[in-house]
Image (cartoon, grey):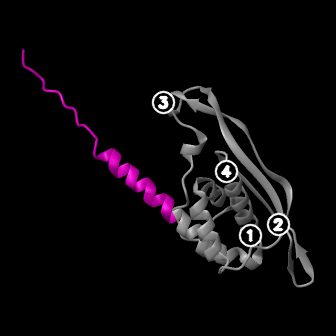
C-alpha cells in the first residue's frame, strides 16, 4: 500500500531545491530540528515580520491508498493535519517583497506549521534564498536521507531468503 507521503523523496542533488522539493523536506522535519536549522540560517537574528493570511489551524484530510502500490485507489482513512499561510513584510531597497509561505503537515503542531510557512516564504525571498538553501534545506535533507538509510538497514537485517529444492522423480 502506498500513500502520497511515502512516494516523494527529498532531493538527491546538491543544487538549489525546487519549491515542491523544499515543501516536502519541511513537511517531514520535526519542530525542534526545523527551529534549530532556521535559527542557524538566520544567524540567530529574529525572523522578519509577517502577516497571517491563514493562522495555523487543525483539520482532517483523507488519505488514499492503493493495493500493491498500483491497484485502484481507495480511501484509507482520515489524518489530522495542520496548515498555515503567511505573507512576509520584507523591504528590499525601495520595494516591498511580499512572499507568501504555506505549510501543511500531518499532526497537530501549530508552531511547526508556523516555522515551515516562514521557511517557505524566506526561501522565495532573494535576500534569504541562498542562505536558506545552504543552512536550512541542506542539513534537513541530509537528516531525512540518513534516517531513511537507517530504516532501510534495519529492514535489510530482517530479510529472509527462501529457496526451494527440486526433487527428482
Q: Earlier in the sequence, mark 4 or mark 3?
A: 3
Q: Is residue 103 above or below residue 34?
A: above
Residue at which label 1 appears: 122
Helix, strand, or loop for circle 2?
loop
Q: Using a 10 Å C-alpha cutoff, classify the residue at mark 1 as few (fewer than 14 neighbours), some (14 to 19) or many (20 or more).
A: many
Q: Residue at x 87, y 78 (%)?
A: 91
Label annotation for residue 68: 3
Residue numbers of the magenta segment: 142-169
Q: Residues within 10 Å of mark 2 (few under 14, many from 20)?
A: some
Residue at image point 90% right, 75% down: 96
Q: CA distance from mark 4 to mark 1?
A: 20 Å
In the image, residue 158 lies in the stretch drawn in magenta: yes
Mark 2 or mark 3, which is nearer the start of the sequence? Answer: 3
Where, by quadrant of the figure, is residue 141 drawn? bottom right
Label 4 with label 3: CB-CB less than 8 Å: no
- The mark lying in front, picked from 3 and 2, is 2
Disc 1 secondary structure class: helix
Spatial distance from mark 4 to mark 3, Cα to Cα? 32 Å
Location of residue 125 in the rendering, given as x and y in whole percent from the top left corner = 77, 72
Residue 93 location in percent, x, y? 88, 85
User: What element does badge 3 sit on?
Assistant: helix
Mark 2 and mark 4 lie on one chain; the one further toward the N terminus is 2
The answer to whether mark 1 and mark 2 are in CB contact below 8 A is: yes
Q: Residues within 10 Å of mark 4 (few under 14, many from 20)?
A: some
Q: Quarter of the image holding residue 16?
A: bottom right
Mark 4 near mark 1, Cβ–Cβ under 8 Å? Answer: no
Residue with the mark numbered 4: 109
* Depth order, front residue of 104/73: 104
- Per the model, the C-alpha gap separating discs 1 and 3 is 39 Å
Within the magenta stretch, is there residue 130? no
Q: Give the side of residue 86 with respect to residue 104, left or right.
A: right
Q: Secondary structure at mark 4?
A: loop
Amino acid at each position: 500500500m502506498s500513500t502520497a507521503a511515502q512516494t516523494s523523496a527529498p532531493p538527491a542533488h546538491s543544487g538549489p531545491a525546487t519549491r515542491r522539493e523544499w515543501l516536502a523536506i519541511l513537511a517531514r522535519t520535526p519542530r525542534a530540528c526545523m527551529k534549530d536549522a532556521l535559527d542557524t540560517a538566520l544567524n540567530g537574528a529574529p525572523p522578519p515580520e509577517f502577516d497571517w493570511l491563514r493562522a495555523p489551524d487543525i483539520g482532517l484530510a483523507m488519505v488514499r491508498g492503493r493495493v500493491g502500490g498500483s491497484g485502484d485507489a481507495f480511501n484509507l482513512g482520515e489524518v489530522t493535519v495542520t496548515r498555515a499561510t503567511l505573507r512576509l513584510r520584507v523591504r528590499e531597497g525601495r520595494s516591498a517583497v511580499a512572499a507568501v509561505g504555506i505549510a501543511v503537515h500531518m499532526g497537530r503542531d501549530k508552531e511547526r506549521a508556523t516555522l515551515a510557512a516562514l521557511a517557505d516564504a524566506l526561501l522565495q525571498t532573494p535576500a534569504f534564498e541562498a542562505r536558506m538553501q545552504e543552512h536550512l534545506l541542506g542539513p534537513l535533507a541530509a537528516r531525512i536521507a540518513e534516517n531513511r538509510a537507517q530504516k532501510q538497514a534495519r529492514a535489510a537485517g530482517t530479510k529472509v531468503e527462501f529457496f526451494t529444492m527440486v526433487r527428482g522423480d
